[in-house]
Each structure stands twice: as structure tokens, then as C-alpha cells.
Image (cartoon, helix red, strand yellow):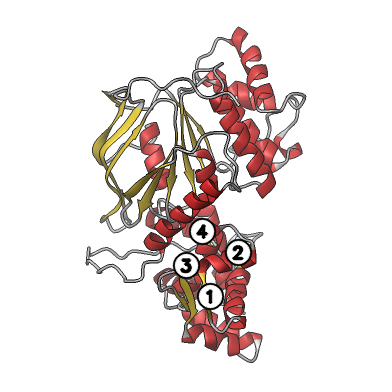
């Protein structure tokens, strides 16, 4: 594999955040802090990964560095100059493909070039080069509905690369594709970045996948949450090409496991500081079936097991297991001292329930202990059979949880609520109503 171009002088920086903070305004007028005093530099010829729990502001920080969001505190610099608007050197690959369904692959790429003001005569050649670069030669006339998830993400990569950016920003770009496709795409991104036939210098990526960042990144920025802060930066000096199974990668993965476990599942709760804000806690993206599966797994092993053993036994990605464990802990079904996951009395009570109806009742009881579900249930009950429109719920989530994936959060809320018979959801009319 071709190594990236020689690193420029150490003082060179492409993009820099200096004491960046950001707040979102809540419906009651209060401000919710999302980022606090972030210092981060992106240097030439490196891959930087932002890693951290849901709600820590990873995507918000990326958007601030891209100039899509103006920070409420601090400043962003591009080549050591203050950046008043959009970052001119950045192209972004989004998590959710973001393709125009009525356009072909070639048209989806061309529309970006046209928006950048590229002369019309130059566009076809640049489209052809970008499409072939990501392995989609021969699919120029295909529509998104005819493509697999991996191919759709390749179109997104082609659009970003077609403008020949200096910085490529990637917001969880492989989370919507299967594991084998994701592994292939990661290797291809590194190959493209390492080549010398383009202007691309560095990559900034948001990820939840520890193995992914160990494989791809040169520096791994671990963020803490509420508000988002830089907890630590881990240098990854392993030579390329890298092997997921090498002892060095596995040691780095274990190191990151320990850092993330300590930050996402601390043994001692942080002291609560009253801010006067009614904060809604983000809902982990874990379906009820996975949460119940975790409880049954622990019950079969005497009520507890080490987190890493659960990962190994279930053959699930570490970040996925963390998400399910956090969901179970949010419902008071488990506790997480150090690296252990322990069944709590509520978890035992749920498992010992004699009928599905009793389990549903316990689940519903736990949901109503959470402010989000308690208030949502109250609104639905007041509306009765008229129902609550999903748009209203989404707007509320956007204001209360501005840094979350709204569609994913809404889908999880629906799954949890239905499982506990807290409400019903009519997909056709997009209405939430009280249970029959």
C-alpha cells in the first residue's frame, strides 16, 4: 500500500478548534451545553477519530469544524485563519447516504459539482473519475433504489471526493452497512487517502466502533458527555497496513475499551449539579429483545459476568454491547461496577415474571420512571383517540436532544413503548394513541 505524503512542518495545521463551546436553546428558553472548551487540531496527512458515548457532541463538533454550525464560544481556524463561515476545504460523507432518489449515480455526483460552481464541460470527466475511484464504474446510470447499502455509501464517498477536498469529514459512515461491507469500505478509504493523486490530506471521522478507529485512525480523541469535553487523546503509531487481528491492534482495542468503560459506565456516579434545566436523558439504541437477551444471558451465568466476556460470548461489537448494557442500566435492570455487569433486583423480578403480561407491566413501570416516557404518556393520554402526531414528538426530540439521531431515537421510543403497552403507534397515519 502506498504510504501518505510526507508530513509537513509540525507547526502546520489544517483546521483547529480553540476553546470551542456550543449550547442549544431549549423550548423553555434555557440553554443546554453540548460542547465545552474543546481544543482540537487536525494536522496534515493524518486520520483523526472522534470516539465517545451517545450525546457527547461528536457530530456537533464535526459540524462546527465544517462551519455548518457556529460555536457559541471559542473559534475555529482554517490554515491558522479565523473561519467566518463554511470551511472551504471540507467535504462530508454522512451516515444516512443522503442521496437524491430521483437521480442516477452520475447525477447525484454531478449535482454537487454544479453547486460548487465547476464549469459544465468539466463535470462529466470529474464524475467519471470519482465514480470509478470508489469502485462504481458501470453503475453510473443506476438509481439509489437499485443499489445496496454499501453501494449507496460509495456514491456518498464519490460525491465528497469529486470536489477534491483537503479534508474529508465522515460521520459514522459505515454504521448503516453490514460488517463485511464496512470492513471493505474502511480499507478502501485508507487506500484512497494514502494515494498521491489528489488534494486530500486528512480525514476526521466520527465513530462508535472501537475496532474501526484502531484500524483507521492515527489519533483517537475520546470525548466525555454532558457536556462534551475532550477526555483524552490516544496516539496510534502502528504502521500501515494494519491487521484487525494483530496483537498490537488488540492491545490498543483493550486500552480503548478500558477508557470507554470508565467514561460510559463509571463505578461512582458523578456529583449532580443543579442547572435549573429539565434534562431528558438520551435513549440508547437498543431494542427490547436485545435487552431481554442480556438479562437472560446474565441469569444463566448466576446473575453477573465481565463485560468483555459478554462481548466474546455473544460475538457482538463492543460498542453494541455497551449500548445494550446502558439501556438495561437506564431501566434499573442491571448495575455496572468496574468491568462487571450485575443483575439488579428489578432485572430478577422481570425475569421471574410468570406471564408476558406481567413482564410488560414491569417494563411499563420502569419506562414511567423516565421523564421522557412519563411526559409522552401524559400527552398521549390527554389527547386520547385523537392521538399525538409523530411530527410533534420529533420536534420535541430535536429541541430536547439536539445531538441525537432523531429517526433512530424515535424508532427506539416506539419499540420500548409498544413493548410495555404504554401506547400504540399507527404507521399509516403516524399517530401515537393510548393502548386499547
Q: Position of residue 58 (x, y in %)?
A: 41, 46
How far apart are the alpha carbons under marks 1 and 4? 28 Å
Of labels 1 and 2, earlier in sequence is: 1
Mark 2 touches mark 4? (CB < 8 Å)? no
x 55%, y 43%: residue: 95
Report, in whole angstroms, how far the alpha carbon at label 1 lies from the one at label 2.
Answer: 11 Å
Q: CA distance from mark 2 to mark 4?
A: 27 Å
Q: Residues within 10 Å of mark 2 (few under 14, many from 20)?
A: few
Out of 164 and 117, give the one closest to the viewer: 164
Please name the residue that numbered disc 2 is placed on. 312
**Mark carried by residue 317:** none
Which quadrant would residue 224 be assigned to in this image?
bottom left
Measured Cα–Cα span from mark 3 to mark 1:
15 Å
**Quadrant in the picture for the N terminus:** top right
Answer few, some or many: residues within 10 Å of disc 3's Cα (few below 14, many 20 plus, some between 14 and 19): many
Assess disc 4: are there few (<14), some (14-19) or many (≥20) residues with their C-alpha within 10 Å of its C-alpha: some
Drawn side of residue 86 relative to residue 300, left or right: left
Residue 326 has which mark? 3
| Marked residue nearer the N-terminal end (3 or 4) | 3
Q: Which callout, 1 or 4, points at the residue further toward the start of the chain?
A: 1
Q: Is residue 57 above or below residue 143?
A: below
Q: Position of residue 192 (x, y in %)?
A: 58, 26
Q: Give the alpha-carbon distance from disc 2 to disc 3, as whole Å.
A: 18 Å
Which of label 2 and label 4 is nearer to you? 2
Report which residue position mark 4 lands on: 409
**Secondary element type, mark 1:** strand
What secondary structure is found at the residue carrying circle 3? helix
Horizontally, residue 357 falls left or right of residue 61, namely: right
Which residue is denoted by mark 1 in the rendering?
A: 305
Amino acid at each position: 500500500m502506498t504510504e501518505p505524503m510526507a508530513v509537513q512542518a509540525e507547526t502546520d495545521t489544517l483546521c483547529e478548534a480553540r476553546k470551542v463551546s456550543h449550547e442549544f436553546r431549549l423550548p423553555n428558553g434555557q440553554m443546554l451545553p453540548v460542547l465545552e472548551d474543546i481544543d482540537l487540531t487536525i494536522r496534515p496527512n493524518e486520520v483523526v477519530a472522534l470516539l465517545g458515548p451517545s450525546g457527547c457532541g461528536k457530530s456537533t463538533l464535526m459540524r462546527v469544524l465544517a462551519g455548518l454550525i457556529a460555536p457559541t464560544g471559542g473559534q475555529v481556524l482554517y490554515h491558522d485563519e479565523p473561519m467566518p463561515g463554511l470551511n472551504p476545504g471540507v467535504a462530508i460523507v454522512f451516515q444516512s447516504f443522503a442521496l437524491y432518489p430521483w437521480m442516477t449515480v452520475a447525477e447525484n455526483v454531478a449535482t454537487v459539482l454544479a453547486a460548487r460552481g465547476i464549469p459544465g464541460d468539466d463535470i462529466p470527466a470529474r464524475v467519471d473519475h470519482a465514480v470509478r475511484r470508489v469502485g462504481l464504474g458501470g453503475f453510473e446510470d443506476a438509481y439509489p433504489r437499485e443499489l445496496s447499502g454499501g453501494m449507496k455509501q460509495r456514491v456518498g464517498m464519490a460525491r465528497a471526493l469529486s470536489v477534491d477536498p483537503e479534508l474529508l469529514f465522515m460521520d459514522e459512515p459505515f454504521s448503516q452497512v453490514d460488517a463485511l461491507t464496512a470492513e471493505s469500505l474502511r480499507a478502501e478509504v485508507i487506500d484512497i487517502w494514502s494515494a498521491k493523486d489528489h488534494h486530500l490530506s486528512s480525514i476526521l471521522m466520527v465513530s462508535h466502533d472501537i475496532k474501526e478507529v484502531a484500524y483507521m485512525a492515527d489519533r483517537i480523541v475520546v470525548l466525555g458527555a454532558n457536556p462534551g469535553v475532550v477526555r483524552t487523546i490516544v496516539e496510534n503509531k502502528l504502521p500501515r497496513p494494519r491487521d484487525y487481528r494483530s496483537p498490537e491492534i488488540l492491545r490498543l482495542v483493550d486500552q480503548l475499551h478500558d477508557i470507554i468503560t470508565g467514561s460510559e459506565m463509571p463505578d461512582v456516579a458523578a456529583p449532580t449539579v443543579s442547572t435549573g434545566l429539565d434534562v431528558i436523558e438520551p435513549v440508547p439504541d437498543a431494542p427490547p429483545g436485545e435487552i431481554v437477551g442480556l438479562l437472560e444471558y446474565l441469569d444463566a451465568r448466576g446473575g453477573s459476568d465481565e463485560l468483555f466476556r459478554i462481548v466474546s460470548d455473544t460475538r457482538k461489537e463492543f460498542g453494541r454491547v455497551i449500548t445494550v448494557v446502558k439501556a438495561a442500566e437506564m431501566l434499573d435492570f442491571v448495575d455496572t461496577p468496574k468491568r462487571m455487569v450485575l443483575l439488579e433486583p428489578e432485572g430478577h423480578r422481570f425475569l421471574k415474571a410468570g406471564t408476558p403480561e406481567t413482564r410488560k407491566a414491569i417494563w411499563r413501570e420502569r419506562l414511567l420512571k423516565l421523564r421522557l416516557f412519563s411526559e409522552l404518556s401524559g400527552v398521549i393520554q390527554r389527547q386520547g383517540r385523537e392521538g399525538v402526531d409523530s411530527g410533534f414528538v420529533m420536534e420535541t426530540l430535536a429541541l430536547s436532544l439536539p445531538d441525537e439521531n432523531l429517526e433512530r431515537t424515535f424508532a427506539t421510543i416506539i419499540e420500548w413503548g409498544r413493548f410495555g403497552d404504554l401506547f400504540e403507534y399507527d404507521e399509516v397515519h403516524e399517530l401515537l394513541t393510548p393502548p386499547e
